[in-house]
Amino acid sequence: MKKIWFVVLITLLASLAGCNGNATPTPTPQPAEDVIFQLSWTHEYSSSGLYMAVENGHFAGQNLNVNIVAGGFGDEGYIEPIDEVLNGESAFGTSSSTSIIQAQAEGKAVVGIATILQRNPLAIISFKENNIVNPADLAGKTIAVSDGAARTRVLTFLAQQGVDADSVTLIPRTTFGIEPLLNGEAQLLAGWIINEGVMVEEAGYEANIMLLSDYALEDYSFIIFTSQEMIDTRPDLVERFLRGFVGGMNDTIGNPSQAVKAVLKYDNTLDEAQQLTRLEVMLPLINPPGEPLGEMDMVVWEQSQDVLIEQGVLTAPIDLNKAFTNQFLEKINGGQ
């Protein structure tokens, strides 16, 4: 009997030794990596893809815990996402192509890695009753336009369309609304189709829209960017973040109603119907047919730089290859 138990004991020990020596240990799950994302404005529909990436687990699927921080104006003034990224407060942020070009010209190594909108939302907007439908109709009219890049783009549009700039009166916008149209101060307003264009409809008017991107005047207004240091030292993190972002953008395109509900979790004071209307107007600008989601075009960056040179903001062009990259999205959109 002792001999039998001895054989059993030896067999059991050998089995345990074999398990301990040959089995692959179960890896310990790594905790999700915390990432801060700095918006350039407050929480709203325009950042739906980011909220959906959180809501539907796309960031979590990349082992990321992403905290989306509102921008706009804080206690110390405007919160500049470029500064927040460069000082290490945030890993990623949103900005525009013109701001990134300016930063590069100042020696600030920030890089655009994706664009939320592939078409520029800037438009010349009027009430339909005024029957201003073609660029030639702009002669003799007054346009309310913000100073800076918007004004330069309107002047570029007039020159492109053969409209004498002296025949058009440009007055500065002083609010974010459509008051110049409502009070008769101007017949036209240069604004975003996704904001002011919707406001006209909400005010009870039909709108005529000249979308500048329909006339090949493009710009990237909502760019996701990071630092060159991040790209050099943590390309894995950049790729994982963008994989989550692409998943969120695809969900937004497929289900805008759910996307707006995700927005409201970040700011429940927003009007759900208004947010949905704006998002639905924005959708065609996100992913035009034949253009890979989020990828950018050198020609558009060159147009943005030309505007800055025309404004006198830049005295010489920069190397735009340092200002943006499609390297991560090309891999992601290519299915790798």
Image (cartoon, grey):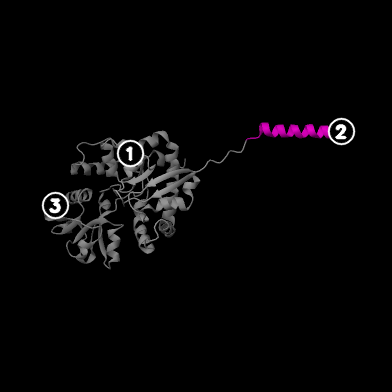
Foreground label between 1 and 3: 1
Q: Is residue 1 above or below residue 182?
A: above
- The residue to which callout 3 is attached is 165
Q: Where is residue 231 drawn, in percent x and y?
A: 39, 36
Q: Nearer the viewer, residue 327 or 13?
A: 13
- The residue to which callout 1 is attached is 110
Q: Residue furthest front?
A: 75
Residue 159 horizontal side relative to residue 44, left or right: left
Give residue 315's mark: none
Identify the element where label 1 is drawn: strand
Residue 301 horizontal side relative to residue 334, left or right: left
Q: Nearer the viewer, residue 198 or 21?
A: 21
Residue occupying image coordinates x 45% and y 51%:
54
Residue 176 horizontal side relative to residue 45, left or right: left
Instruction: Name the chief secondary structure element in magenta.
Output: helix
Amino acid on which the number 1 mark rests in the picture: Val
Classed neighbour count for the residue bearing mark 3: other residues with Cα under 10 Å, few (<14), some (14–19), many (≥20) = some
Residue stretch rendered in magenta on the structure: 1-24
Q: In the rendered view of the protein, which quadrant contains the N terminus? A: top right
Distance of label 2 from label 3 (alpha carbons)? 108 Å
Amino acid on which the number 3 mark rests in the picture: Ala
Q: Where is residue 130 drawn, in percent x and y?
A: 19, 65
Classed neighbour count for the residue bearing mark 1: other residues with Cα under 10 Å, few (<14), some (14–19), many (≥20) = many
Identify the element where label 2 is drawn: helix
Q: Residue furthest bottom?
A: 204
Q: Residue furthest right?
A: 1
Q: Where is residue 111 drawn, in percent x and y?
A: 34, 39
- The residue to which callout 2 is attached is 2
Q: Quadrant of residue 334?
A: top left
Foreground label between 2 and 1: 2
